[in-house]
Amino acid sequence: MSAEFFRIKNGLAQNLILLLAAICIQGCGEQKHDSRAEDGPQRPAPSAAAAEDAYKKRSLEFPADFPLPKYPNSELEASQVKLSDKPAHTVILTSRDDVPTVSHYYFKALKQGGWDIGKVINNKTYMMLTASKDGREANVMVSETRTGITAISLYSNKK
Amino acid sequence: MPRDRISLQILFDRLPQFSERDLDEAAKNVSHNPPDFRYQLPKDTSVAGEGAASSNAHKIRITFSDKKLEERDLAQISAHVRLVPDTVAAIEKHTAYIELSVEPNPAKPLDAYQELTFLACLIALRDGSAITNINGFTSFSAPGMLQLLADNDWSDAIQEMPPLFLYCGPVLHEFDNNTNLWMRSYGSHLLGIPDLGTIIPTEIIQEYVPMTLQIFDNMMSYMIESGNAVEPGHTMETDSVTIKLFDQQAADDEYFYQSPSGMLRVEYTPKPGFVMPRFA
């Protein structure tokens, strides 16, 4: 295989991948199997160890140059990511406020901040929107988790 | 109901009445370059029956059914939307459906899927409640799907759709007594490529799932577009991760490891300093 084929898609394709991710994570835990459970998938040690290392290296500060606001009633679980040669940031927050409340905040905050709101997928239990401003693109995803906590994912890159 | 061919279903509370002209006009409203379908529809589409739509490349069979989908089919299309309320409600409440299918083994299966998707969305405008893919273990609420296409030229948007979105799952399987999840595609054999699966450690699911979907989508697109196979033993280096492929064997009772075109297990190792994107 060539590494050339690996690319992060933009626009609608990227939004659809994010929507799939939200659906998968939301639905996790509802499809159990007891068949051969003892012999079920085993975690490959090298990959998992590396992933856990990466997990521990998450930034725990809200990035000062991040263009989207932090939801006031939220706690930070920040990740700062760089993919390929394009600077891109992802910040994760959690809140005990419900999805519509958090979504309303971001609609209002982005409009007041001069962002152009693009695609919006809105539901009682998840919301995703895309926005652009001054050459930047951003995604906001808000979704209800199984534990009742609302997860907020903020993503921004430069065109 | 044949399961050896590319197909999509549109669910309804009751079968809608529509004509060839209705579909033609709708197509012109949503795309500057819609597929050039020639229809043979029954006079009354609100009852069970058969019809067809032919393009330059494919002949699409249209089956009108005034019954619910069978239990096994319902289980498959519910596999990845278990907690998405509007889709779950649409599946529970439907009493009729229209199935679109093409002959087995079309020369360009992705093109066939895209034509089916365009027609499915056109028909879903007639109060469809869900668009589903039994072979792909997938379903979306029809209003949600139409909302995704809104403001886009439908032909362009459907061409941009990742293969993984409507055609191939994905599904997350959870096992008793095992903290890891198994995420895999379904129905990739209809696109002429193997299914892909990977192990997801539960504690970092929010990092692994988006990353894995990106990797799956890239691998699928690469195989479909280039015609090249990826095989067990192949490795790939990207800026961020090292990807390795393994043959995933399956016992008779391990349907979650089975695939008509073979199952490749994808393992990847993040490189030092790389932190996986995390989406909720």
Image (spheres, rainbow, N blue to C red):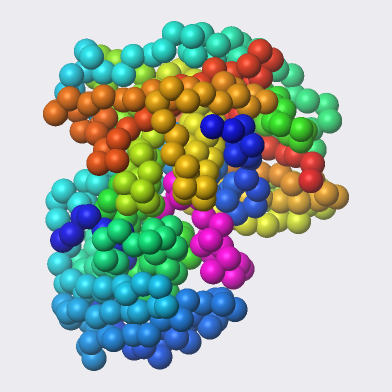
Q: Position of residue A8 (x, y in %)?
A: 63, 40
**Which residue corresponds to the image point at 41% horizontal and 53% vertical from the top-left?**
B166
Q: Which is the main secondary structure of the residues drawn in magenta?
A: helix
Q: Return the x and y of residue B123 as percentages of the image width and height.
A: 37, 74
Q: Nearer the viewer, residue A49 or A96?
A: A49
* Quadrant in the rendering for residue A53: top right
Q: Is residue B150 above or below residue A110?
A: below
Quarter of the figure that contains the N terminus of chain A:
top right
- Where is residue A6 drawn, in percent x and y? 60, 36
Q: Is residue B89 above or below residue B42?
A: above
Residue B81 visible, this orientation: no
Please tell me in which quadrant of the rendered image residue B55 appears: bottom left
Reply above or below: A53 against A135. Answer: above
> In the image, is A63 to the left or to the right of A126?
right
- Judge left or right: residue B126 versus residue A75: left
Seen in the image, is A20 located left or right of residue B136?
right
The residue lying at 44 percent from left, 39 percent from top is B229
Residue B221 location (% of width, % of height): 51, 46
Nearest the viewer among B248 and A12 is B248
Q: Is residue B104 magenta?
A: no
Between residue B62 and residue B132, name the one nearer to us.
B62
Q: Which span is picked out in magenta?
A: B147-166
Does the magenta run of residues contain B160? yes
